[in-house]
Image (cartoon, rainbow, N blue to C red):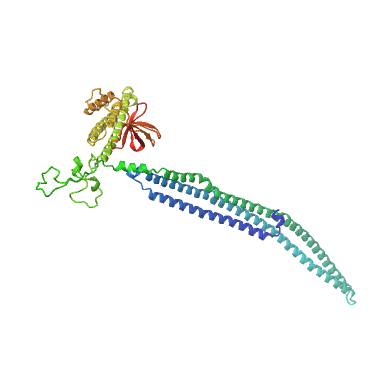
Amino acid sequence: MDWGTDLWDQCDIIEKHTQSGLELVEKYVKFVKERTEIEQNYAKQLRNLSKKYNQKRSSKDEPECRFSSYQAFLDILTEMNDYAGQRELIAENLMMNICIDLTKYLQELKQERKTYLMEAKKAQQSLESTYKQLDSSKKRFEREWREAERAAQYAEKTDQDINATKADVEKAKQQAHMRAHIAEECKNDYAAQLQKYNKEQNQFYFNDMPLIFNKLQDLDERRVRKLAQGYILFSDTEKHVMPIIGKCLEGITKAGTNVNEKNDSVIVIEQNKSGFERPGDLEFEDYSQGINRASSDSSLGTPKGPMDLLGKNKSKNFWLFSKRSKKFTPERTMPAVTEDFAHLPPEQRRKRLQQKLDEICKELQKEVDQSEALGKMKDVYEKNPQMGDPASLASQINQTSQNIERLRGEQSKYETWLAEAGGRGDALRYKAHSFNNNGANDVHSPDGAYSDESTPDPSQAIYAEFDDDFEDEELAAPIGKCTAMYNFPGASEGTIAMQEGEVLAVVEEDKGDGWTRVRRSNGDEGYIPTSYVTITLNK
């Protein structure tokens, strides 16, 4: 079935239908554009929301950053930001694949439809023009035929009139004959015009218009097919990003399952454990006895409060109360921040000193490596002058040597403070000894040459003495065993790596600094975080 056959007489209906179809495409494009704007606004709001709650911090070492619940929340914000990106992708694909493509296709359809309607209009105008010619020849034929009849009747009447002369009769006959001839010509012209019109009309209704209607039908079917594809794309555009959106949602679920409340509690302890002993009982003051309390050292003397019971720390503020006191008096002011972290509680001070010492060791190792590299480069330049001038490295070598000496001084200073704070001297000596092995004690002269004879470092004698003692020391017997709950890389000196589920022998218990010394079956020893394992001690 086609429009040219079945709708040959419904030109107005076809024109109206095709126009309505194009308007539907425009309406759908507008609908998708508004949907795109909604997606873009939704994505923008999600990004702003993630940005609002994901406050940028100057350092990742903030205390709360270590909590699994805090990290999980940051992961959720990251996943939401990625989710917003997928919503933006949906909006972009809807705009590109539907709105822009359909708009371009719609313009082509409009132009094509306009062309077909113009062809139909021209064919109709041509038929109407032929019809006018036919009507004109028909009216002329009718008029001339009536004139010929009147002329014939007048000639016959003149011929029967006894008073008419022969000349009048002849003239009337000639006039009637002329009119009859003109009428015959008009008849022939009318017949020719009628034949022409019928031919054109047949061409118009059976060929020209059916062909145009079929073209319009094909145009409309292509429009419907393209619109249907747009409908499908509307769904497929979102389906294509659903796997990624699903991963974002899975990431949010994973963030929730990764929260470990027990581990967070351990971190709170590690971050805030002061190391102080709990205050003892206050002693009784007997005012009934005439004793000079100001100079008495007996049990009846001045009662010992929390500050007195802290022993060597009595000159410092009592941390439990001074840090949480809302009202500060001139006698109780916050301690000043010092380089040796003496303003911190013992446990926190040890951790900060150890952290600072680790940073110095890393920086020192970096300078030592750079010094070795500069020395090798200078040797290459001396052997191959065309590659560079050895003197150009003198300033860099000198600066590196100064940095090494400065860092060694800081290292020695912080080691001393850490020893005073009760830190682990053996772990530090391992680190210092590792620098010896890496050539940290090789002193470079200002000109960059290596010096075999260098001024001995007093601290090196201590390290060497410790190394000798350590070599002679027999392996301590295990006091228990532990099972790793988490993976630990063991990247720092003195530590040992472990995998989740691995069983290790416990050599030394945690002394309050959060580290336990363990040993593998192959003899490797090192420290691991106490919170990362479950420990079972021998009875």
From the viewer's perspective, tell me whether residue 134 is left or right of residue 504.
right
Q: Write the residue at 50% across / 48% down.
A: 90
Q: Nearer the viewer, residue 132 or 447?
A: 447
Where residue 15 sits: x, y (%)? 64, 58
From the viewer's perspective, tell me whether residue 207 is left or right of residue 447.
right
Quadrant housing residue 270? top left
Where residue 377 sits: x, y (%)? 32, 26
From the viewer's perspective, tell me whether residue 525 is left or right of residue 420.
right
Q: Write the residue at 72% across / 54% down.
A: 207
Where residue 222 sits: x, y (%)? 63, 51
Question: Which residue occupies the extreme front position in the image?
Answer: 288
Residue 120 can be seen in this image: yes
Where residue 395 sits: x, y (%)? 27, 30
Q: Nearer the viewer, residue 374 or 213?
A: 374
Considering the image in quadrants, where does the C terminus appear?
A: top left
Quadrant housing residue 407? top left
From the viewer's perspective, tell me whether residue 376 is left or right of residue 15.
left
Residue 59 can be seen in this image: no
Using the image, determine if residue 255 lies above or below residue 361. below
Quadrant housing residue 361? top left
Give the tally of numbered discs: 0
Q: Write the residue at 38% across / 50% down.
A: 53
Q: Nearer the viewer, residue 7 or 465?
A: 465
